[in-house]
Image (cartoon, rainbow, N blue to C red):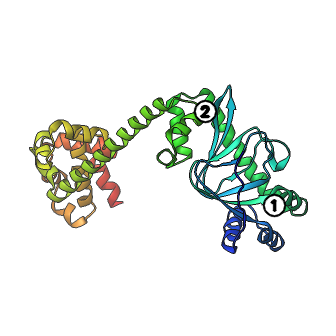
């Protein structure tokens, strides 16, 4: 049995906190606000404390202000996590909602948790006289059932990786915050499997971060030194300039920029040429071929082929379109 909890009358800031959440769904009138000011309670429970047990009537509906709760049930003497709720989630008995019957699940604190509570007797009375409260809770329940349906679907048909991605997407940050064994129980996968998947994705994130850092370093170097204008630039020479091995530079260009070395260099050359074509005084004094050679192209054909591949038209057509 859960220990006796000491409920306290909620402070004005607590009422405002609740009203702010409810206002997102529907306007709360002055009379309903007064009711919450009279009947809203506050409760703090410690990690691992049971909020209510199986086969008990849950007398309140709760709003989590800070912390996390998990709903659990037992089957063949095995604990099964049915949901995990955190800040701004409403929590009560699912099977015995609004005190209508005995709860088939128990709820326990995953962290030290701060709650706001309304007794079901008061809430049921408010439902009779305040349409807006009925509407608000209908929307809240609709969201809960949509989330529950999606969770049930992914657990039934998704593999372990898909379940991990689902939880990471719908609960950003919680994989680092919540105990791994609880998340594993919720997703119906082994904790060791979930840990392995998590490590693999962390490795991918670290790799992407490293690629991004090197990508920015390469771009800064090319912009500053205009390396693309060197006709004899090669993968090996650029790698040496930026302090990477040729193999690592090739990986950054292919994986981060999604380009081969020559296409990556040519895009800088073409952008440099396009910028100069836009200036009438430059294009009047220099031919397109002269600009191409100055940009680093070694031949007219290489310039025309690269320009058309990237821009979708020849340099002459591009120049004429600008003049129009």
Q: Quadrant of residue 147?
A: top right
Q: Quadrant of residue 244?
A: top left
Count of marks placed on residues? 2
The one of 226 and 91 positioned closer to us in this rendering: 91
The one of 289 and 213 positioned closer to us in this rendering: 213
Q: Residues within 10 Å of mark 1 (few under 14, many from 20)?
A: many
Q: Is residue 146 above or below residue 47?
A: above
For the residues labelled 1 and 2, say whether their Cβ atoms are less than 8 Å apart: no
In which quadrant of the rendered image does the N terminus lie? top right
Q: Position of residue 191 (x, y in %)?
A: 49, 32
Reading the chain from its start, which is encountered first: label 1 or label 2?
A: 1
Q: CA distance from mark 1 to mark 2?
A: 32 Å
Query: Which residue is depicted at the point 29% across and 43% down?
Result: 308
Q: Is residue 132 above or below residue 161?
A: below
Q: Is residue 280 above or below residue 199?
A: below
Q: Which element is circle 1 on?
A: helix
The residue singled out by tag 2 in the image is 154
Query: Which residue is depicted at the point 68% across and 32% down?
Result: 74
Q: Position of residue 29 (x, y in %)?
A: 80, 71
- Is 297 placed left or right of 33 in the picture? left
Asked whether residue 293 is in view, the answer is: no
Q: Residues within 10 Å of mark 2 (few under 14, many from 20)?
A: some
In which quadrant of the rendered image does the C terminus lie? bottom left
Q: Position of residue 227 (x, y in %)?
A: 14, 52
- Is 58 placed left or right of 262 in the picture? right
The one of 239 and 204 positioned closer to us in this rendering: 204
Q: Is residue 309 above or below residue 117?
A: above
Q: Position of residue 255 (x, y in %)?
A: 31, 39
Q: Which element is circle 2 on?
A: helix
Q: Which mark is residue 133?
A: 1
Asked whether residue 320 is in view, the answer is: yes
């Amino acid at each position: 049995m859960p220990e006796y909890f000491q409920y306290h009358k909620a402070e004005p800031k607590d009422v405002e906190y609740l009203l702010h959440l409810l206002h997102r769904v529907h306007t709360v009138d002055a009379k309903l606000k007064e009711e919450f000011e009279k009947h809203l309670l506050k409760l703090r429970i410690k990690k691992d404390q049971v909020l209510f047990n199986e086969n008990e009537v849950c007398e309140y509906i709760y709003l989590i202000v800070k912390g996390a709760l998990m709903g659990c049930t037992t089957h063949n003497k095995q604990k099964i996590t049915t949901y995990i709720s955190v800040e701004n989630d409403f929590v009560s008995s699912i099977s015995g909602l609004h005190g209508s019957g005995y709860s088939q699940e128990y709820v326990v604190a995953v962290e030290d948790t701060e709650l706001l509570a309304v007794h079901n007797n008061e809430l049921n009375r408010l439902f009779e006289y305040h349409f807006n409260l009925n509407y608000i809770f209908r929307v809240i329940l609709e969201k809960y059932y949509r989330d529950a349906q999606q969770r049930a679907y992914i657990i039934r048909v998704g593999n372990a990786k898909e379940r991990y991605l689902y939880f990471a997407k719908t609960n950003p940050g919680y994989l680092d915050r919540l105990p791994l064994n609880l998340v594993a129980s919720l997703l119906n996968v082994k904790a060791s499997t979930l840990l392995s998947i998590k490590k693999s994705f962390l490795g991918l994130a670290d790799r992407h971060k490293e690629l991004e850092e090197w990508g920015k370093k390469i771009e800064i170097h090319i912009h500053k030194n205009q390396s693309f204008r060197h006709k004899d630039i090669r993968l090996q020479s650029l790698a040496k300039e930026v302090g990477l091995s040729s193999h690592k530079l090739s990986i950054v260009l292919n994986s981060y920029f999604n380009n081969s070395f020559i296409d990556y260099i040519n895009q800088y050359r073409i952008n440099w040429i396009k910028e100069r074509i836009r200036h009438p005084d430059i294009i009047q004094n220099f031919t397109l071929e002269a600009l191409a050679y100055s940009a680093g192209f070694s031949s007219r054909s290489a310039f025309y082929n690269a320009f058309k591949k990237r821009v979708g038209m020849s340099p002459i057509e591009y120049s004429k379109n600008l003049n129009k």
